Amino acid sequence: MKMNWLADELASIKDKGLYRRLSTIESAQTPRIIKDGRELILLSSNNYLGLTTHPKVKKAALEAIENYGTGAGGSRLTTGNTELYNSLEERIAKFKGAEDALVFSTGYMANTGTISSLMKNGDLILSDELNHASIIDGCRMSRAEVMVYPHKDVSSIETALRKSKHLGKLIVTDGIFSMDGDIAALQEIVELAKKYDAMVMVDDAHATGVLGKHCGGTSDYFNVNVDINMGTLSKALASMGGYVAGSSELIDYLRNRARPFIYSTALPPPAVAAAKAAIDIIEIENPAKKLWQNIAIYKKGLAGMGFTVKSETQIIPLMTGETGNTIKAASELERLGVFAQGIRPPTVPEGKGRIRTSLMATHTELDIKEALSAISIIKEKYRL
Ligand SMILES: Cc1ncc(COP(=O)(O)O)c(C=O)c1O
């Protein structure tokens, strides 16, 4: 009786075409996967550099299991900390050019924990309308006033900062936007923050390992400093977890105040070791070079078919519009041998459904050619 409403709610989600099912892959996150017994080209993975199956990353994870076991056994502040975690944090700080870094169990927790512990009642957060859900949730948890500004609209940030009488001010933005693949206007944001004494936080979930001269992310790309450099270990870094890099004082504060860090078990040792090995590979082997070559080949192919590609990066959405059209186009693409996720509300606004395609450094030219030929088939039929 008490839970009858669940069935009604589920029926309503289904009516709107917004019901979500888990897709199950029967292989590793490689450019060709096995799903429902069929080989498909994977064109939607966040394993951008293909490092989840890199021999050195797998070896590091296996050695960590040998040395430390499979689980951490406690939170970092209790019994869960080992030299492995300290060395990953040192490695991240160096990679990001920061004084220190702190690792959380997920990127989601890094965002919610950081924003909610830094910002409080009486403060102002300025957040891009296309920021990731974990930023939105961190803002909600903070009790600060939140102003959501139109996508990349720096003039509305300035208007809000000029009027603001708040104690603390934070501008927070994705580095690479996760559903559109464009890059934040970070240079302008940093200048405004200086002028109006605000902090800047960048979520480099999709930019770490990919963007910038040293693959250090958006601040590396624009050669600017930000106060709070957040990212995940779960995408190009081939593992699991989130991090924040910044001043020693910031990291010390988060270690003492960020509840998702304090009250959750540390990451399993193999995940920590894998991320550290991935950073080494990024610096030594530069796999991002191949990723950018693949992006250029793919974009050229799409442009040749008449697509207007606005994305600046490895995330390239093919706009499908309404929910019904999105579902049909994505499932036909899968029937044609390409697996890429159809994205519907609430992840994207109503009417802005899309197939979110993304490139990997390990895609071959043949993978990309075959994917493009499948896309050309669905393009006309579903008005892409
Ligand atoms: C922009 C952005 N921030 C944060 C996250 C959360 O990271 P994680 O998957 O490590 O929790 C994601 C992941 O989907 C993301 O796309």
Image: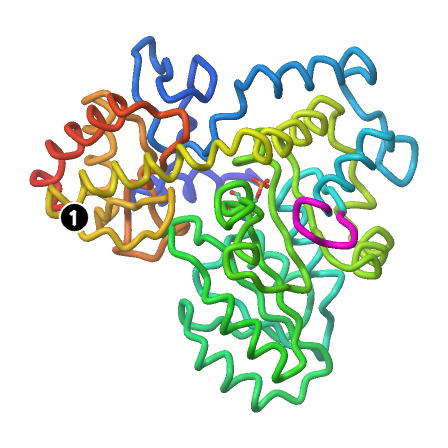
Looking at this view, name the residue that lies furthest to the right: 78
Q: State yes or no: Cβ of the residue under disc 1 lies below 8 Å from any atom of ligand 1.
A: no
- The picture places residue 27, in percent across and down from the top left corner, at 44, 13
Residue 309, given in percent of the width and then of the height, sits at: 24, 51
- Residue 75 drawn at (x, y percent): 84, 36
Crowding around mark 1 (Cα neighbors within 10 Å: few <14, some 14 to 19, many 20+) is some
Apparent side of residue 6 relative to residue 301 in the rendered image (left or right):
right
210 or 65, which lies in front? 210
Helix, strand or loop for disc 1: loop
Of residues 285 and 307, the one nearer the viewer is 285
The N terminus - image quarter: top right
Q: Quadrant of the C terminus?
A: top left
Answer with left or right where residue 328 lies relative to residue 264.
left
Frontmost residue, 1 versus 169: 169
- Magenta highlight on residue 29: no
Is 144 drawn above or below residue 11 in the view shown? below
Quadrant hosting residue 65: top right
User: Quarter containing ligand 1?
Assistant: top right
- Residue annotated with mark 1: 307
User: Could you say which quadrant of the image residue 331 lies in?
Assistant: top left
**Relative side of 60 to 27, left or right:** right
Q: Is residue 194 above or below residue 320?
A: below
- Residue at 54%, 23% (x, y): give it: 52
Q: Position of residue 220 (x, y in %)?
A: 56, 55
Q: Residue furthest left?
A: 380
Write the residue at 46% across / 62% down: 184
The amino acid beneath tag 1 is Phe
Tell me where the magenta segment starts and ends, as one range: 94-101
Q: Measuring 42% from the left and 68% from the top, which residue is drawn there? A: 152
Q: Is residue 211 shown left or right of residue 32?
A: right
